[in-house]
Image (cartoon, rainbow, N blue to C red):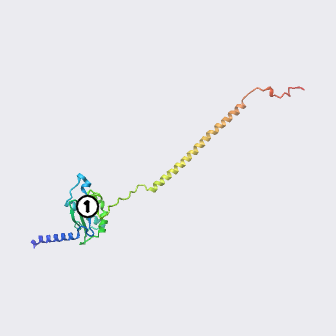
Amino acid sequence: MVSRLPFLLCLLLALASALATNLCKPEADNGYKVRLSIKTALGDKAYEWNESEMFLFRATLAFAMRKHFNTETYDVSNILVCNDTPRVSFWFVVTKPENTSQLVPGAQVEVAVRKSRNRINSAFLLTDQTLQFLGIPPTLAAPYEPATPPWLIVFGVVISLVTIGILALLISTFVQKRRKGKAMPEEEKMENVYENSLEGKSGALNGGFVEDDKYTQL
Protein backbone atom coordinates (compact mmCIF):
# COMPACT_ATOMS: atom_id res chain seq x y z
CA MET A 1 0.00 0.00 0.00
CA VAL A 2 2.82 2.36 0.86
CA SER A 3 4.49 1.63 -2.44
CA ARG A 4 1.40 2.82 -4.24
CA LEU A 5 1.43 6.27 -2.65
CA PRO A 6 4.00 7.77 -5.06
CA PHE A 7 2.02 6.38 -7.96
CA LEU A 8 -1.20 7.88 -6.66
CA LEU A 9 0.48 11.25 -6.12
CA CYS A 10 1.84 11.23 -9.65
CA LEU A 11 -1.59 10.31 -10.95
CA LEU A 12 -3.22 13.18 -9.05
CA LEU A 13 -0.62 15.64 -10.34
CA ALA A 14 -1.17 14.41 -13.88
CA LEU A 15 -4.92 14.81 -13.53
CA ALA A 16 -4.48 18.29 -12.09
CA SER A 17 -2.16 19.20 -14.95
CA ALA A 18 -4.60 17.85 -17.51
CA LEU A 19 -7.44 19.76 -15.88
CA ALA A 20 -5.39 22.95 -15.88
CA THR A 21 -4.50 22.42 -19.54
CA ASN A 22 -8.15 22.07 -20.46
CA LEU A 23 -9.21 25.11 -18.48
CA CYS A 24 -6.29 27.40 -19.26
CA LYS A 25 -5.30 27.86 -22.88
CA PRO A 26 -4.85 30.77 -25.28
CA GLU A 27 -8.08 32.55 -26.10
CA ALA A 28 -9.80 30.56 -23.36
CA ASP A 29 -13.18 31.69 -22.16
CA ASN A 30 -12.89 33.80 -19.02
CA GLY A 31 -9.11 33.90 -19.49
CA TYR A 32 -6.77 36.86 -19.90
CA LYS A 33 -3.34 37.32 -21.41
CA VAL A 34 -0.65 39.12 -19.41
CA ARG A 35 2.39 40.80 -20.92
CA LEU A 36 5.26 42.22 -18.86
CA SER A 37 7.96 44.62 -20.11
CA ILE A 38 10.42 44.35 -17.26
CA LYS A 39 13.54 45.48 -19.12
CA THR A 40 11.70 48.40 -20.69
CA ALA A 41 10.53 49.56 -17.28
CA LEU A 42 13.62 48.92 -15.16
CA GLY A 43 16.54 48.91 -17.62
CA ASP A 44 19.74 47.74 -15.92
CA LYS A 45 17.81 47.03 -12.72
CA ALA A 46 15.50 44.56 -14.44
CA TYR A 47 15.02 41.29 -12.56
CA GLU A 48 14.77 37.83 -14.07
CA TRP A 49 11.34 36.33 -14.48
CA ASN A 50 11.30 32.84 -12.95
CA GLU A 51 9.07 30.43 -11.07
CA SER A 52 9.27 32.52 -7.90
CA GLU A 53 8.05 35.60 -9.78
CA MET A 54 5.26 33.53 -11.30
CA PHE A 55 4.29 32.33 -7.82
CA LEU A 56 4.18 35.96 -6.67
CA PHE A 57 1.92 36.82 -9.59
CA ARG A 58 -0.47 34.00 -8.73
CA ALA A 59 -0.41 35.07 -5.08
CA THR A 60 -1.27 38.68 -5.95
CA LEU A 61 -4.14 37.48 -8.16
CA ALA A 62 -5.41 35.29 -5.31
CA PHE A 63 -5.20 38.37 -3.06
CA ALA A 64 -7.19 40.42 -5.60
CA MET A 65 -9.89 37.73 -5.77
CA ARG A 66 -10.08 37.56 -1.96
CA LYS A 67 -10.41 41.31 -1.71
CA HIS A 68 -13.07 41.50 -4.41
CA PHE A 69 -15.25 38.71 -3.00
CA ASN A 70 -14.35 39.51 0.62
CA THR A 71 -13.49 35.90 1.32
CA GLU A 72 -10.37 33.91 2.22
CA THR A 73 -11.24 30.85 0.17
CA TYR A 74 -9.14 31.81 -2.85
CA ASP A 75 -5.62 30.42 -2.94
CA VAL A 76 -2.67 30.24 -5.30
CA SER A 77 -3.98 26.92 -6.58
CA ASN A 78 -7.04 28.73 -7.97
CA ILE A 79 -4.86 30.75 -10.35
CA LEU A 80 -4.00 28.63 -13.38
CA VAL A 81 -1.29 29.84 -15.77
CA CYS A 82 -0.42 28.50 -19.19
CA ASN A 83 1.34 29.26 -22.48
CA ASP A 84 4.09 31.30 -20.84
CA THR A 85 6.83 32.58 -23.15
CA PRO A 86 10.43 33.77 -22.56
CA ARG A 87 9.37 37.31 -23.45
CA VAL A 88 7.26 37.16 -20.31
CA SER A 89 3.74 36.72 -21.52
CA PHE A 90 1.20 34.12 -20.47
CA TRP A 91 -2.48 33.37 -20.05
CA PHE A 92 -4.30 32.83 -16.78
CA VAL A 93 -7.72 31.78 -15.55
CA VAL A 94 -9.24 31.66 -12.07
CA THR A 95 -11.08 28.61 -10.78
CA LYS A 96 -13.85 28.62 -8.21
CA PRO A 97 -12.71 27.56 -4.72
CA GLU A 98 -15.75 25.35 -4.18
CA ASN A 99 -15.36 23.66 -7.56
CA THR A 100 -11.96 23.86 -9.25
CA SER A 101 -13.37 22.48 -12.48
CA GLN A 102 -15.35 25.68 -13.03
CA LEU A 103 -13.93 29.08 -13.90
CA VAL A 104 -14.77 32.39 -12.33
CA PRO A 105 -16.50 34.58 -14.97
CA GLY A 106 -14.09 36.89 -16.75
CA ALA A 107 -16.14 39.96 -15.78
CA GLN A 108 -15.56 39.23 -12.09
CA VAL A 109 -11.86 38.65 -12.67
CA GLU A 110 -11.65 41.99 -14.49
CA VAL A 111 -13.29 43.83 -11.60
CA ALA A 112 -10.97 42.15 -9.10
CA VAL A 113 -7.89 43.08 -11.13
CA ARG A 114 -8.99 46.68 -11.54
CA LYS A 115 -9.65 47.03 -7.80
CA SER A 116 -6.17 45.79 -6.88
CA ARG A 117 -4.27 47.04 -9.92
CA ASN A 118 -2.00 49.35 -7.94
CA ARG A 119 -1.09 46.56 -5.51
CA ILE A 120 -0.31 44.19 -8.38
CA ASN A 121 1.82 46.78 -10.16
CA SER A 122 3.70 47.63 -6.97
CA ALA A 123 4.54 43.96 -6.37
CA PHE A 124 6.51 43.90 -9.63
CA LEU A 125 7.70 47.54 -9.69
CA LEU A 126 5.76 48.10 -12.91
CA THR A 127 2.93 50.28 -14.24
CA ASP A 128 -0.23 49.82 -16.29
CA GLN A 129 1.89 50.30 -19.41
CA THR A 130 4.57 47.72 -18.52
CA LEU A 131 2.28 45.17 -16.81
CA GLN A 132 -0.58 44.75 -19.23
CA PHE A 133 -3.70 42.68 -18.75
CA LEU A 134 -4.86 42.46 -22.36
CA GLY A 135 -8.61 42.90 -22.48
CA ILE A 136 -8.73 44.71 -19.13
CA PRO A 137 -8.59 48.51 -19.53
CA PRO A 138 -5.92 50.28 -17.46
CA THR A 139 -7.13 51.81 -14.25
CA LEU A 140 -7.95 55.48 -14.56
CA ALA A 141 -6.23 57.85 -12.19
CA ALA A 142 -8.51 59.36 -9.64
CA PRO A 143 -9.54 62.88 -10.54
CA TYR A 144 -7.59 65.57 -8.81
CA GLU A 145 -9.52 67.17 -6.00
CA PRO A 146 -8.03 70.44 -4.80
CA ALA A 147 -7.93 71.09 -1.08
CA THR A 148 -10.13 74.15 -1.66
CA PRO A 149 -13.29 73.66 -3.76
CA PRO A 150 -13.34 75.71 -7.00
CA TRP A 151 -16.59 77.44 -6.06
CA LEU A 152 -15.02 78.63 -2.82
CA ILE A 153 -12.04 80.04 -4.74
CA VAL A 154 -14.36 81.96 -7.11
CA PHE A 155 -16.42 83.20 -4.16
CA GLY A 156 -13.27 84.40 -2.40
CA VAL A 157 -12.09 86.25 -5.52
CA VAL A 158 -15.46 87.98 -5.95
CA ILE A 159 -15.60 88.98 -2.28
CA SER A 160 -12.05 90.29 -2.47
CA LEU A 161 -12.84 92.44 -5.52
CA VAL A 162 -15.99 93.82 -3.87
CA THR A 163 -14.05 94.60 -0.68
CA ILE A 164 -11.29 96.34 -2.64
CA GLY A 165 -13.90 98.39 -4.52
CA ILE A 166 -15.61 99.48 -1.30
CA LEU A 167 -12.29 100.41 0.31
CA ALA A 168 -11.26 102.38 -2.77
CA LEU A 169 -14.56 104.26 -2.73
CA LEU A 170 -14.26 105.09 0.98
CA ILE A 171 -10.66 106.23 0.60
CA SER A 172 -11.55 108.36 -2.42
CA THR A 173 -14.44 109.99 -0.51
CA PHE A 174 -12.25 110.67 2.50
CA VAL A 175 -9.52 112.24 0.37
CA GLN A 176 -12.01 114.50 -1.43
CA LYS A 177 -13.53 115.69 1.85
CA ARG A 178 -10.10 116.38 3.25
CA ARG A 179 -9.14 118.43 0.18
CA LYS A 180 -12.35 120.46 0.41
CA GLY A 181 -11.72 121.06 4.12
CA LYS A 182 -8.28 122.48 3.35
CA ALA A 183 -9.56 124.66 0.51
CA MET A 184 -12.31 126.42 2.52
CA PRO A 185 -10.03 128.00 5.24
CA GLU A 186 -7.67 129.30 2.55
CA GLU A 187 -10.52 131.06 0.75
CA GLU A 188 -11.76 132.59 4.00
CA LYS A 189 -8.25 133.73 4.80
CA MET A 190 -7.91 135.42 1.43
CA GLU A 191 -11.23 137.27 1.92
CA ASN A 192 -10.22 138.40 5.42
CA VAL A 193 -6.94 139.71 4.11
CA TYR A 194 -8.71 142.03 1.66
CA GLU A 195 -11.24 143.22 4.23
CA ASN A 196 -8.60 143.92 6.87
CA SER A 197 -6.43 145.75 4.40
CA LEU A 198 -9.31 148.05 3.47
CA GLU A 199 -10.54 148.64 7.00
CA GLY A 200 -7.14 149.23 8.53
CA LYS A 201 -5.81 151.47 5.82
CA SER A 202 -5.54 155.20 6.86
CA GLY A 203 -5.43 157.86 4.19
CA ALA A 204 -5.81 161.68 3.69
CA LEU A 205 -8.97 163.24 2.43
CA ASN A 206 -8.94 164.38 -1.14
CA GLY A 207 -10.14 167.97 -1.29
CA GLY A 208 -11.50 167.55 -4.74
CA PHE A 209 -14.20 165.24 -3.49
CA VAL A 210 -15.08 167.19 -0.34
CA GLU A 211 -18.37 168.99 -0.37
CA ASP A 212 -17.68 172.71 -0.38
CA ASP A 213 -21.14 173.81 0.81
CA LYS A 214 -19.96 174.19 4.31
CA TYR A 215 -16.99 176.30 3.16
CA THR A 216 -18.67 178.45 0.50
CA GLN A 217 -20.58 181.48 1.69
CA LEU A 218 -23.21 182.83 -0.48
Residue drawn 60% across and 41% down?
179
**Can the viewer see residue 74 in this picture?**
no
Q: Residue at the far right: name it.
A: 218
Q: Quadrant of the N terminus?
A: bottom left
The image quadrant of residue 105 is bottom left
Across and down, in percent, residue 93 comes to 25, 67
Residue drawn 25% across and 54% down?
42
The residue that label 1 is drawn on is 35
Residue drawn 16% across and 70% down?
14
The image quadrant of residue 2 is bottom left
189 vs 96, left or right, is: right
Across and down, in percent, residue 145 comes to 40, 57
Residue drawn 14% across and 71% down?
11
Across and down, in percent, residue 4 comes to 10, 72
Across and down, in percent, residue 138 comes to 32, 61
Residue 24, placed above or below residue 145? below
Residue 177, placed above or below residue 217? below
- Circle 1: residue type: Arg
The image quadrant of residue 56 is bottom left
Q: In which quarter of the image is the C terminus?
A: top right
The one nearer the camera, 80 or 178, is 80
SS type, badge 1 = strand
206 vs 112, left or right, is: right
